[in-house]
Image (cartoon, rainbow, N blue to C red):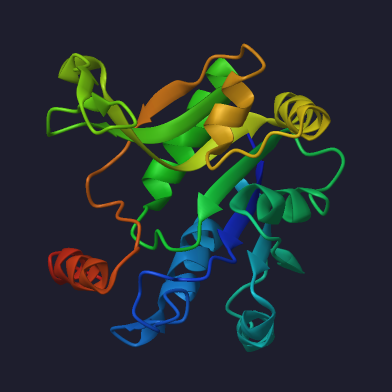
Amino acid sequence: MNIKASVVIAAAGDSVRMGGIDKQLADIYGASVLARTISVFESSEKVDEIIVVSKPKTLEFIKELIESGDVKKITHMVTGGSTRQQSVFNGIKYVKEDAEYIAVHDGARPLVTVEEVERCIDDAALYGAAALGVKAKDTIKIVDSDGFVIETPDRKNVYHAQTPQIFRASLYRKAMEQAIREQKDYSDDCGMVEATGAKIYISAGSYENIKITTPTDIISVKNVLDGRRDR
């Protein structure tokens, strides 16, 4: 499919569980987490433009990436808001008006592959919205506010959502307008789009598509890269 997506990379988090480490700039085998993430989308023929949303102190680093000549698809660098949703919305403002598809990806997921990204884009083109995901390995329990189990979902129907999450641009903007109108703040773009009644297709992801949240996740990322030919 000759589909092009505009990508918003959300990299404005505070890294509160990283013990003082800025996870976006953490060095992994000579390259930062954020640089690794950007390079995946830079390498995809199905990605038309990249908007990076980050903390103010990270903007200079992104500028250096652009000036190095290794990254040519970044069109805008944008500072984040007080929540993930607000940060992503800051980036959406700079997506070109005629974009067909909008993809949102966590800057702290550097191990996603070009193949996974492009598969998810193709699935979004087929179904209107798609997100990478993997089946839950563990049994999931739903608990009440007191900590007691109230439901055990059938594991075969439970998936861990990943990013990128990709949507037809008109659908995403409709969902964004609804969230603003209803003053809702979602931690997940799929959840926001689901609130419009739209269905999201789960595109086959990988357990290697780790999101770096704690220092031990960096060790896990290194372990995955150790098993890859080109790290």
Left or right position of 150 against 126: left
Residue for point 18% across, 63% down: 224
Is 216 or 105 nearer to us in this picture? 216
**Split into 4 quadrants, where in the image is the C terminus?**
bottom left
Residue 109 is drawn in which quadrant? bottom left
Is 108 or 119 nearer to us in this picture? 108
- Expressed as whole percent of the image width and height from the top left, the position of residue 192 reads 61, 29
Q: Is residue 1 visible?
A: no
Q: Kindly give the residue lying farthest to the right in the view shown.
A: 97
- Expressed as whole percent of the image width and height from the top left, the position of residue 49 reads 70, 55
Q: Is residue 63 above or below residue 6?
A: below
- Expressed as whole percent of the image width and height from the top left, the position of residue 73 reads 67, 64
Residue for point 83% across, 29% down: 181
Residue 162 is drawn in which quadrant? top left
Q: Is residue 138 visible?
A: yes
Left or right position of 191 against 138: right
**Split into 4 quadrants, where in the image is the N terminus?**
top right
Question: Number of callouts in the render?
Answer: 0
Q: Is residue 27 above or below residue 81?
A: below
Q: Kindly give the residue lying farthest to the front in the view shown.
A: 146
- Expressed as whole percent of the image width and height from the top left, the position of residue 11 reads 56, 65
Residue for point 24% across, 33% down: 147
